[in-house]
Amino acid sequence: MARPMSRPVPKSFHVKSFGCQMNVYDGTRMAELMQEQGMVEAGADDAELVVLNTCHIREKAAEKVYSDIGRIARRDGGKPMIAVAGCVAQAEGGEIPRRAKAVDLVVGPQAYHNLPALIAEAASGTKAIDTDMPAASKFDALPSRRNAGPSAFLTVQEGCNKFCTYCVVPYTRGAEVSRPWSAVVVEARALVERGAREITLLGQNVNAWTGEDEAGRTQGLDGLIRALDRLPGLERIRYTTSHPNDMTDALIAAHGEVESLMPFLHLPVQAGSDRVLKAMNRAHDVASYLRLIERVRAVRPDIAISGDFIVGFPGETDAEFEETLAVVRAIGHAQAFSFKYSPRTGTPAATMTEQVAEAVMHDRLQRLQALLSEQQFAFNRATVGRSCQVLIERQGKSPGQMLGKSPWLQSVLIDGGRIGDLVDVEIVAAGPVSLNGRVTERIAA
Ligand code: SAH
Ligand code: SF4
Ligand code: F3S
């Protein structure tokens, strides 16, 4: 047997994240861990280690990993050490280096704290694989926060117990776990100290978060939000993604009472037919979903509603798809994501008979997306003339132009201001996906 080829431990890294915001968050934490080890961040073409932080949610996303691996292995600067992290790593584990020999390291989402050891192992010439889901939290073993932009992510909850019949998340991310209250508060404080003015609390089912506060009282996400609202310097709080069944009365009330809680709610309904929702194992029906939206709007009339939709779930008829369009019309979205159903091995829906033809799904998706885009444009137009605050996140394309977010999570282009400023703006024009604003306060140049 050939002896494994050893090589120097990489000194630079590049993390490329795909999928949901939780992956983006994990990517930041991995980068911080590697920086703590003395490694420096570099571009994808030069880094000695490239980490692909992958998503397994749909087949296209998962398959893309393999073409990326091939491209990185053949890059001009020579092949770097290649690590696969994220949900494909969790789902496929040791299969990945068997299928793509260029892969040196596989690390699942619950094992990131072991990265330094895995990198050393891979450098010694062995394929390093860790997809364990240990009982102890990886978060405790990760270094404290070093980086934060004006708008930061903070994972407070991981995993899912809902088992929607189409979805891989309960398998790739495991059971629902909430991070402890104190850990969240400490991390939020660290982020604010490093410049964050907005924090988005993340979880696959973030509104299932539960924990005990300093006084030992059981709290839900609403309690956590109220505590973070009291953090000096933290101006805005958001959370995503929520499940309708965990939308408690207290969380709804918080939307009417907590000023820093932004008027935006991502609450996926997925489909508009009760039969399809049942087959999806969503455990809510259309009427109960619409009632929730009504109640949130009662306490926060300007709330921007976002969601996720799947078209072409096995057995979905034309009439059932029309019900989805009807529900979309009834809700009125500020934005939304919509997808063709993608069968995932190991999920119950993958073996259901009556898979819907690709051409039918394509047509349904076009129609749904046309309607959702129309709604987004209408929502944007309705903000014209309004005054609001914009949190500046980065520079725009033209000189002097800055880009920030409205309270309703719309992108707003303004002239002037600095990254991290929260400025008073009047919305003067609306496009399909962004707004133009005029700064109405005096700001430093
Ligand atoms: N936990 C979140 C979302 C997780 S995945 C929730 O339940 O809302 C993000 C979205 O991807 C889902 O809301 C769903 O719309 C979509 N999705 C998940 N599995 C899919 C599949 N097999 N095919 C197509 N879309 C899927
Ligand atoms: Fe997937 Fe459903 Fe869990 Fe969301 S609630 S992560 S769609 S199983
Ligand atoms: Fe994708 Fe995993 Fe997130 S499958 S959507 S990266 S939880």
Image (spheres, grey):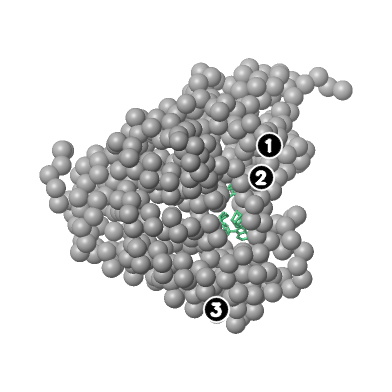
Give residue 78's quadrant in the image.
top right
Q: Secondary structure at mark 1?
A: loop
The front one of 336 and 254 is 254
- Where is the C terminus found, in terms of image quarters? top left
Q: In this figure, which residue is indicated by the disc labeled 3?
A: 323
Which residue is painted at 59% across and 75% down in the image? 273
Q: Position of residue 343 (x, y in %)?
A: 69, 61
Ligand 3 closer than 8 Å to label 2 CB:
no
The residue identified by callout 2 is: 174
The Cα atoms of the two marked residues, 3 and 2, are separated by 32 Å
Label tally: 3
Q: Is residue 255 above or below residue 29?
A: below
The amino acid marked with disc number 1 is Met
Q: Residues within 10 Å of mark 1 (few under 14, many from 20)?
A: some
Q: Position of residue 72 (x, y in %)?
A: 60, 37
Query: Residue at (22%, 46%) from the top-left corner?
Result: 423
Q: Residues within 10 Å of mark 2 (few under 14, many from 20)?
A: some
Residue 323 appears anywhere in the view: yes
Which amino acid is tagged 2?
Answer: Gly
Contact between marks 1 and 2 (CB within 8 A): the answer is yes
The extreme right residue here reads 1
Instruction: Say which element carries label 3.
Output: helix
- Placement of 81 over or under 166, stated as above or below: above
What is the secondary structure assignment of the residue under circle 2?
A: loop
- Say which quadrant the N terminus sits in: top right
Residue drawn at x 32%, y 65% as measured from the top left = 301
Q: Which residue is mark 1?
A: 133
> Residue visible at 48% across and 45% down?
219
152 shown above or below 424: above
Tag in front: 3 or 2: 2
Check residue 253 in the rendering and tell me which mark sits there, or answer none. none
How far across and how far down the image is residue 162, in percent? 64, 56
